[in-house]
Image (cartoon, grey):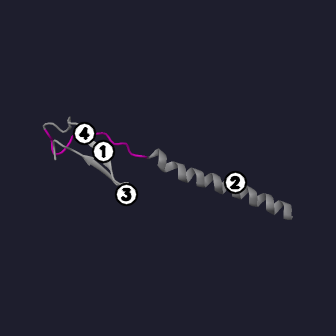
Amino acid sequence: MKSETSNLFRVLQVILVCLMFLAISNPVAAEETYQFERMWPTLQQPWYFMEGKIATDKHKFIYLLDFYYN
């Protein structure tokens, strides 16, 4: 009797794990994808072509230096 109860319990555990796996994996299939349409506001030249520099201080803070565009 005890053996049958433990076997039934194990079968129920396996079924529960399978159902949980299916419930968790379903939202991955419904994931949205995004596609770029346009930039707002529209800039005449949205890219920078002047070279900048990177500096750090003794506290390990990072500074981005931009000489031309301020």
Question: In the image shown, does 46 or 61 lie closer to the viewer?
Answer: 61
**Local crowd at mark 1 within 10 Å, few (<14), some, or many (≥20)?**
few
Q: Mark 2 points at which residue?
A: 14
Q: Which of marks 4 and 1 is in front?
A: 1
**Local crowd at mark 2 within 10 Å, few (<14), some, or many (≥20)?**
few
Q: Name the residue under label 1.
A: 54
Q: Nearer the viewer, mark 4 or mark 2?
A: 4
**Local crowd at mark 3 within 10 Å, few (<14), some, or many (≥20)?**
few
Question: In the image shown, does 40 or 53 lie closer to the viewer?
Answer: 53
Q: Nearer the viewer, mark 3 or mark 2?
A: 3
Q: What residue type is labelled 1?
A: Ile
Q: Mark 4 points at which residue?
A: 37
- At a point 64% along the width and 55% down the height, the residue shown is 17
Given contact means CB atoms under 8 Å apart, are the residues at marks 2 and 1 in contact? no
Which segment is the magenta one? 31-43
Residue 59, disc: 3
Q: Which amino acid does label 3 sit on?
A: His
Report whether 56 appears left or right of 44. Answer: right
**Local crowd at mark 4 within 10 Å, few (<14), some, or many (≥20)?**
few
- N-terminal-most mark, 4 or 2: 2
Q: Residue 27: x and y, percent? A: 48, 50
